[in-house]
Image: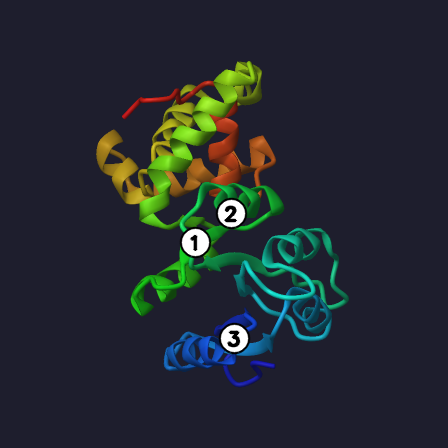
Amino acid sequence: MNKENPAKIRVALADDQALVRNGFSLVINSQPDMEVVMEAGDGAQALERLSLVPADIILMDVRMPHMNGIEATSKIAKTEFPHGVTPKIIILTTFDLDEYMMSAIEAGASGFLLKDAPPDEMLHAIRTVHRGEAVIAPSSTKRLVDYLAAEAVQARMINPQLVAGLSEREQEVLTLAAKGLSNREIAQKLFLAEATVKSHISRIFAKLGARDRVQAVVIAYQAGLVRPGEE
C-alpha cells in the first residue's frame, strides 16, 4: 500500500451506506495528500479488515448493524494489529447529541464530526487528527466543555494532583486548550511562538499519559483547571 507516495494519509471508511462511502471516497481521493485504503459496511467488518490493511485514520459511523461505531471504536483502540498501525478514529454521525460525543471520546475517538459537515471541514479534521490533535464539531465543543466540567464537579472528582507534574506554563497552556483554543490562538494569547506551544502540548501529553488533546482536556476538567461556566 502507498508504495508510490508513503506520505499519503491512509483513510479507512466504516459506514453501512454505500452511497455515503462513495461520496467520502470521491472527496478524499481527490486530495494529493490522502487516499482511501479500506471500506467496511459495519464495525465488525472494519475491525477484521483493519487487521489486514493499515490505515492512519478511520471515519466511523455511529449507527451500523452487527457492531456499532462506538463499540468498534473501543475494540480498535485496544487492538494491537499485526502490522503495528492503530488508526486514529473520527466519529461521524447525523446526531449532534452529547451521549454519542461522550461515548465516542470515552471509547477512544480522537474526533467527532457531523456527517453533514462541509467537505473542507472533513478534510481538515482528517489532517488535524493525523497530526496528533483532536477535533470536535464546533457546535458540540461548548456543550462538551460544560458537560465535562459539570460532571467532574457533581461527582466530586476534582483532583488537582492529576496535573501536579506540569509546570506553571504547561498548566496555563492546558487550561487554554481546555477552553477550546487552538495552538495558534494559545500562542497569540500568551505571546509565544506557535512551535513553542506545540512543544508544550507534546510535553503535556507525555506527562499526563494522554493519547491526544481530547484526553488531556478531560484530565484538565477532572483536575479543576476549568470549571463550569468559565469562558
Count neighbours of disc 2 (C-alpha within 10 A) and say few if under 14, some if 14 to 19, many if 20 or more. Answer: some
Tell me how far mark 2 sits from mark 1, CA to CA: 8 Å
Q: Secondary structure at mark 1?
A: loop
Q: Earlier in the sequence, mark 3 or mark 2?
A: 3
Residue 52 percent coordinates (x, y): 72, 74
Residue 3 percent coordinates (x, y): 57, 83
Q: Is residue 83 above or below residue 106?
A: below
Q: Secondary structure at mark 3?
A: loop
Q: Earlier in the sequence, mark 2 or mark 1?
A: 1
Count neighbours of disc 3 (C-alpha within 10 A) and say few if under 14, some if 14 to 19, many if 20 or more. Answer: few
The reply to whether callout 2 and callout 1 are in contact (CB within 8 Å) is: yes
- Residue 24 relative to residue 14: left or right: left
Type of the residue with mark 1: Phe
Tell me how far mark 3 sits from mark 1, CA to CA: 16 Å
Q: Is residue 177 above or below residue 43?
A: above
Q: Secondary structure at mark 2?
A: helix
The reply to whether callout 3 and callout 2 are in contact (CB within 8 Å) is: no
Does residue 166 appear in this view? no
Q: How many marks?
A: 3
Q: Is residue 143 above or below residue 158?
A: below
Identify the residue position indicated by label 2 in the image: 100
| Image point (77%, 66%), residue name | 82
| Image point (47%, 29%), residue name | 148
Identify the residue position indicated by label 3 in the image: 17
Identify the residue position indicated by label 1 in the image: 95
Residue 83 percent coordinates (x, y): 72, 68
Type of the residue with mark 3: Gln
